[in-house]
Amino acid sequence: MPDTDGPGGTITDLRVQENDADRVSVFVGGEFAFGVHKDVVVKHRLTTGQTLTPEDREAVLADEATVQAKQTALDYLAYKPRTETEVRRKLRETDTPAPVIEDVVARMRELGYLDDEAYAHDYAHNRFSNKGYGPVRIRRELVERGVDRPLADRAVDDLFADADAQGAAREHAEKYWPRIADEDDPRRQKQKLHDYLRRRGFTADTIYRLLDEFVGRR
């Protein structure tokens, strides 16, 4: 984060940085003082000969912190969809002040880059389509990623209003069964199959419907 504790003084030079044309080096009293985004220069009308008070400097660097945080958030979101909680966590890793984090999250939400409800529905659909996971696991994963429980519940309930959880559980059981088919003790078979399906997120009701169907078969 920029150092906001420096003194004020007179701006003696403004130079576009060689490695990044969007950033400007600000010199105060003939020495490099700090670098800012060109938008911050425009917003504060920074010019050579301008006198910066300590309060001016603090305001400039506060806006620079916001610009940096927005770029961090955009870069993070460019890789794949994220939740608001994940973006907040990412920004905290860069020591971004809490008020700046909330401003940036609000802006990302306004721009449509953050939408936890849409994220929850898309995530639930993808995890079921690609992995065949059950509602318990998908709900837990959503909450772990910072989706509010009511949103997670709604996304999972909407998905499994149409999705065939029983069929998905049966597919998992069929794939797992050869690993335990030679088990001599039916109780151990049942426990292993139960635990396997539970790890994949199926409800007890769904699991118990399958146990008698599989356990004991050869």
Image (spheres, helix red, strand yellow):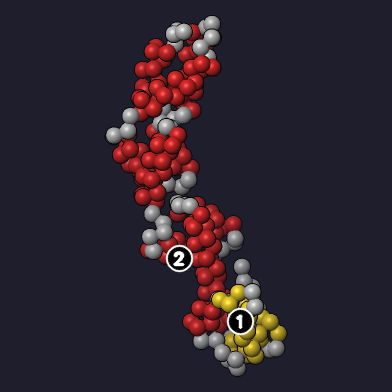
What is the x, y in percent for residue 148? 40, 46
Q: Residues within 10 Å of mark 1 (few under 14, many from 20)?
A: some
Q: Amino acid at mark 2?
A: Asp
- Measured along the vertical axis of the image, is residue 80 above or below residue 48? above
Q: Nearer the viewer, mark 1 or mark 2?
A: 1
Of label 1 and label 2, which has the lower sequence position? 1
Residue drawn at point x = 52 percent, y = 65 percent: 71
Q: Residue furthest right?
A: 31
Q: Residue furthest bottom?
A: 49
Q: Quadrant of the N terminus?
A: bottom right
Residue on which the image places disc 2: 103
Q: Amino acid at mark 1?
A: Val
Residue drawn at point x = 41 percent, y = 41 percent: 126
Residue on which the image places disc 1: 16
What is the x, y in percent for residue 47? 56, 90
Q: Residue furthest top?
A: 184
Looking at the image, can residue 88 be seen? no
**Helix, strand or loop at disc 2?**
helix
Number of numbered discs on residues? 2
Give the distance between the C-alpha atoms of the residues marked 1 and 2, in whole angstroms: 27 Å
What is the x, y in percent for residue 216? 45, 7
Q: Residues within 10 Å of mark 2 (few under 14, many from 20)?
A: some
Could you say which quadrant of the image residue 26 lies in?
Answer: bottom right
User: Is 162 displayed left or right of 199 in the figure?
Assistant: left
Residue drawn at point x = 44 percent, y = 20 percent: 174
Residue drawn at point x = 39 percent, y = 17 percent: 210
Looking at the image, can residue 111 be seen? yes
**Helix, strand or loop at disc 1?**
strand
- Measured along the vertical axis of the image, is residue 125 above or below residue 66? above
Front-most of 60 and 6? 60
What is the x, y in percent for residue 145? 48, 45
- Measured along the vertical axis of the image, is residue 174 above or below residue 48? above
